[in-house]
Amino acid sequence: MSNHQWLCSVCSAHFTRMEHLRRHLRSQPLHENATKRHEKTCKAQTSAINALGTLAPVCNKEISHSVNEAPFQNADPDVADEDACLAKIPASSDFEALDLLYSQDLTPDSTVLAERLEFLAYFTSAKGIATFLDQDTLKQWQKLLLEYERHIEVYGYDRDTTSLDDTCHSAGRQVFPNSWGSAAENTIDPSVVHMISDDSDLLFLRTQEIIHDLQTLITQKADRSIIKLDWSPSVQESCSTLFAPNNIRRFLGYFWSLWYPNCPIVHRPSFKPQTAPLTLLCVMVVIGACLSPHDGDRSFARMWLDTVEELVFSNEIFQEKSVLETTPPVLEAQTEWKKRCVECLQMTYLLARNIGLSASHRDLELKDPSESWWRTFIVEEERIRSLLYVFCIDSAITMLHNSPPRMVVSELKMDMASPEECFQARSATECFTALSAWKDSIFWRERLSMSAVVRRICQRSLDDHLVQEYSRMGTLNMCTIVLSLHALIFSLQNSLIFESTFTPVQTGLENWGRIWNKRIPEDRYTPDDPHTIWKKIGFVRYAAEFWHLARIIVARVQSGSLPKSQTDLSRYDHTDMVDVNGLIMEYRRMSLSAPPST
């Protein structure tokens, strides 16, 4: 291996032997002061060292949070250049002046900045699970995890197993083909690293359970099944590899870091893969693999997506009010796939109503932070959040696919979601302390349901005191409210009662914008660190863009140029997002090309 170059990921020094790289890195700590000490011992001092230790806070063009001085972070110089160019574009005569969009005084997630609609333009034109975050954020987080993995590979141990119990454990992992990119600049060959896992035996039992259930499902699949795999030695090997104990742990790490911020409905501190429902564990593993920073992992996982989906919906709980029997025995492949998606969504709505839409902490007393008290809070909060996300998905489908909502705003009798600080707490005492601070809010004090809050912000213009009070509700609740307004807009837009007015919705939109600009993001001080990415805000951070899209739709309907029933969004229940993307791109073109208003 004398001709192989081993690369130091900290200072870019090259070594001809792996042992030299190990010795080189082990002489330095991996914390924030690493680069300072590294400069004293490293012979190959490059600009990378200075960049690592002196990163200033940078505002990503699509991220609604500041990038801090996390050890593995990089700033994108193109962001500043692009903003500098865009700042010279003339303002629109039909919307707020674009010079405000690029004001240096704006916060990264202000409503004015959201008028660019950059994320929605990307989201409605792309496909795949990775689109729930803007490309820069996802790549940044993937790179962060990859750098952390490589440090673990070199050091041979996890530097902080207490706080990163499930994240990116590389213990004896099986890396799929092409997982490490170009072989010319490997930091270290993963096959020569040996690490020991404390949970291997217990997870091995889960692996055997998963293989057994998937084999049974595949061998007994019905003719109309969406499963394309046939059980064979190669398929069994693939299954054993994907769900191997160490890969379960690794993919769960990716799930928590790269997907969980988009859908924080599972209580992570109390989650145990050894005892979690098998179907839930399978879904989490496959999602984590699909978002892996390694290309080989992603392609490997995609072949199991349909099978795992079938496994989930084969659960008896989904058969209580099944609509599967309405499916004709023979359908074209594309039609069958669409029908299956509709059926799965229908199942979700039915189950949401079965478990009750009035989930509440109303009976939870703040007296003693016992383990049983904490367990009661966890179960009810998971129920509240799950129901909110079911509604958000339904309303998002209405917004993006012009589909009639299956749920209505008046059904939202559940509590507002509790603050992330409460749900992320790692102990009963920590949760109790955070919840005690929340009890003084108007939402807990008056036991306001989600529908009650929507009603209040649509009734009248809120005074400044209430705006400040409502700004504490949190990003998930803010996103749910703006999607509720989209559902109301759809109903009004397609109403046969022509005297119906948009005034309540417009009032709600005005109040929502004021509230959003007063809020303090929950992850404002959460560093971009492998240990804390799971606490970041994901998809709901783009709620301000949903808000601005709602304003555009209302303005178009009320412009008088077209009757309400003849808007461009004339297709219903379509599976693509062409119409809404066309509306967004038309707005962006008009805004960027219009002459300055006089």
Image (tube, grey):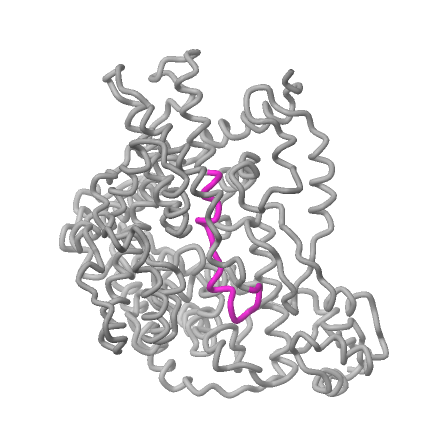
Question: In this view, which residue lies farthest toward the top?
Answer: 561
76 is within the stretch colored magenta? no
Taking the spot 85% from the left edge, 75% from the top edge, the residue there is: 44
Relative to residue 495, is residue 96 drawn left or right?
right
- Comparing 16 with 492, the one in front is 492
Residue 17: x, y in percent? 77, 84
**Placement of 405 over or under 569, stated as above or below:** below
529 is within the stretch colored magenta? yes
**Placement of 315 over or under 351, stated as above or below:** below
Taking the spot 33% from the left edge, 23% from the top edge, the residue there is: 502
Question: In this view, which residue lies farthest toward the right?
Answer: 43
- Split into 4 quadrants, where in the image is the C terminus? top right
**Placement of 333 over or under 447, stated as above or below:** above
Residue 458: x, y in percent? 31, 33
Taking the spot 45% from the left edge, 38% from the top edge, the residue there is: 514
Residue 422: x, y in percent? 36, 65
Q: Is residue 574 visible?
A: no
Question: In this view, which residue lies farthest toward the left?
Answer: 320
- Number of dots carrying numbers: 0
Relative to residue 578, is residue 208 drawn left or right?
left
Q: Is residue 236 visible?
A: yes
Relative to residue 477, is residue 15 drawn left or right?
right
Q: Which residues are magenta?
A: 527-545
- Comparing 130 with 562, the one in front is 562
Residue 517: x, y in percent? 49, 43
